[in-house]
Amino acid sequence: MAQRLNYLEQVTLCDVTPQALENGLKIIKSSLGRVAKKAHPDSTEQQKSFVDSVVSTINTTTDAQEAVKQADLVVEAIVENLEVKRKLFSSLDTHAPEHCIFATNTSSLSVTEIADSTSEGRRATFGGLHFFNPVPQMKLVEVIRTSNTSDATNAALIDVCERMQKTSVSCKDTPGFIVNRLLVPYMLEAVRMLERGDASAEDIDTAMKLGAGYPMGPIQLTDFVGLDTCQHIMTGWREKGALSPELVEPIKALEEKVKEGKLGRKTGEGFFKY
């Protein structure tokens, strides 16, 4: 039987500094405020009550080891760096209860390699929960299972998604899981077309929006994801030999943009200006 996690009762938000925690809570309150306005458009009092009731269940701390001592579920969403993630989980392993499930929100790293930083027993309660940005709006969560993930752990993670009113899809621990395995090569090929001069960025995006029914074109999507992020994923896959070589060949146009600091929407310019 799946372990039922009481994730809605109390949540502990952990970050490296008090300022980061303050900013995190600010973002959460802003998101909750939008939900409250839709749910109670005619009552500011009810809106405030809704936001306050949810925020009251969130504790904050900068002490990760203390945060996990009574946790049922730990979801990590730190920098997309294998060694940094491994170091974190290794440091938490002996402080969390035996039944506690560890989950990484990685979008491109091997869940197995991250889980290997923990004890043998913990690897059975280790999986992936890959949420998509912006999380409040995006319904999808990829639930990733390694060869060591137990049936109970996998079922519990799917249950968590259901109780969050998310749609989960299950996938083995394969490079890029489902979405990024299909999406990243698609975006990279669009950049190659642009580099070869096959078509302009505008025409590539228009073609895929009107011809394939995509809500956003691949060049703009690359800007939104972040050019550095796309290059990082491509480099990681190439170094591991995870995909066919032609899919992850270096792209000069992409490398030059990253070197110039033009990383996409987050810097105000990528292949488009924002």
Image (tube, rainbow, N blue to C red):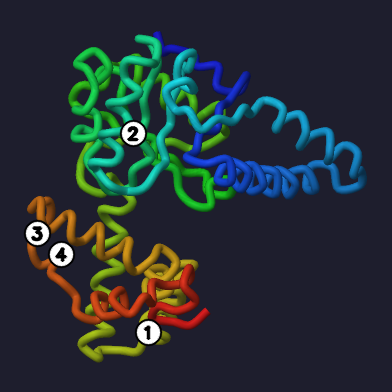
Amino acid under disc 2: Gly
Residue 107 visible somewhere in the drawing: yes
Separation of residues labelled 2 and 4 (CA atoms): 24 Å
Task: Find disc 2 in the rendering and name its residue.
Answer: 128
Relative placement, left or right, of 31 versus 263 is: right
x, y percent for residue 171: 28, 36
Q: Are marks 3 and 4 in contact (CB under 8 Å)?
A: yes
x, y percent for residue 127: 31, 28
Task: Find disc 1 in the rendering and name its residue.
Answer: 201
Task: Find disc 4 in the rendering and name its residue.
Answer: 248
Q: Is residue 42 above or below residue 170?
A: below
Relative placement, left or right, of 71 versus 249 is: right
Amino acid under disc 4: Val
Amino acid under disc 3: Ser
Residue drawn at point x = 35 percent, y = 18 percent: 153
Residue drawn at point x = 49 percent, y = 23 percent: 67
Residue 172 visible somewhere in the drawing: no
Residue drawn at point x = 40 percent, y = 78 percent: 270
Q: Sequence-wise, which precedes: disc 2 or disc 4?
A: 2
Q: Which label sits in the foreground, 1 or 2?
A: 2
Q: Is residue 267 above or below residue 92?
A: below
x, y percent for residue 235: 18, 60
Residue nearest the viewer, comparing 15 with 187: 15
